[in-house]
Amino acid sequence: MNLVSIGARDLPDAWFQCVYEIVDKGHKYVIDYGSYAGQKRLEFDYVTVHIKYPGVRPLIPDIPASLGIPNPVAEGYVEEYLPYLMTPKKEPNEDYTYGERLAGWSYISPAAGEGGPTTGKVERRVVNQIEEIIKMYKTKGYGTNQAAMTVSVPSDILLGDPPCLRHIDTRICHGKLHFVVYFRSWDLWNGFPANLGGLQLLKEYMAGEIGVEDGEMIAASKGLHLYDYVWELAQLRTMRT
């Protein structure tokens, strides 16, 4: 496997560098199973992207007007996407949302008696991982490796379209909140900039609630790809062949 490491200044720079590098360092294959089966992908074997200043605006890709191609992320979309990460609202036709997993996951727990052991019964509870991590840092201190948010559950393996984002790990270092995220599969052209923009806004919210500064972001994936229908757009933006 070809392990690629990219260092970027901000989110637009990270997107451009990934699009530029995938032309040389990605591999082409036909999708046997999953989204867009039968089509081709150009994909990194494994990539890690370290973004030093992810909060620099704008958060979306920089597309020179002279190229005549649309921006992969519409103006204002990242802000509209944020509730999808931070609230548990889910439409009837949706198997899951990231917000449901992060901010409103329902689970079965043993029922506790009045100040004593469990009663032998069970009850359904809801956990908001975002708020629990904020509380953890504020009440337990910053020196912990437990402040990680999980998106996937074992039954996702049965879904036709399981979550791409799998976890958001966090760390407070030198007074700043940093995110370390992992995507099992990731559309580079549209998904990468929209997802990271939304995650950056989530990080800024959490940093403000904790009382620390906004920090860096590290994103990793063994499935960051370009579908064949955007290969020509990628060549136009990077002036590659």
Image: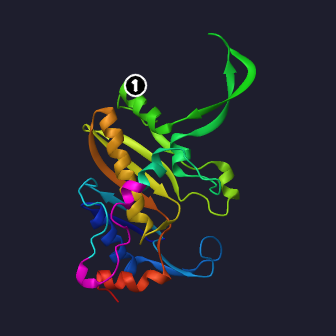
- Residue at x 39%, y 76% (from the top left corner): 22
Q: Is residue 166 magenta?
A: no
First to last magenta residue range: 64-80
Around disc 1, counting alpha carbons within 10 Å, would you say few (fewer than 14), some (14 to 19), or many (20 or more)?
few
Q: In the picture, which quadrant includes the C terminus?
A: bottom left
Q: Is residue 76 magenta?
A: yes
Secondary structure of the residue carrying tag 1 is helix
Q: Residue at x 42, y 51 (%)?
A: 82
Query: Relative to the observer, which residue lies in front, 49 or 99?
Result: 99
- Relative height, residue 174 to residue 193 (above, below): above
- Relative side of 112 to 24, left or right: right
Q: Residue furthest top?
A: 115
Q: Amino acid at mark 1?
A: Lys
Image x and y of residue 167, in percent = 50, 49
Furthest toward the right, the residue is 120
Determine which residue is flagged by label 1.
140
Location of residue 21 in the rendering, given as x and y in whole percent from the top left corner: 35, 75
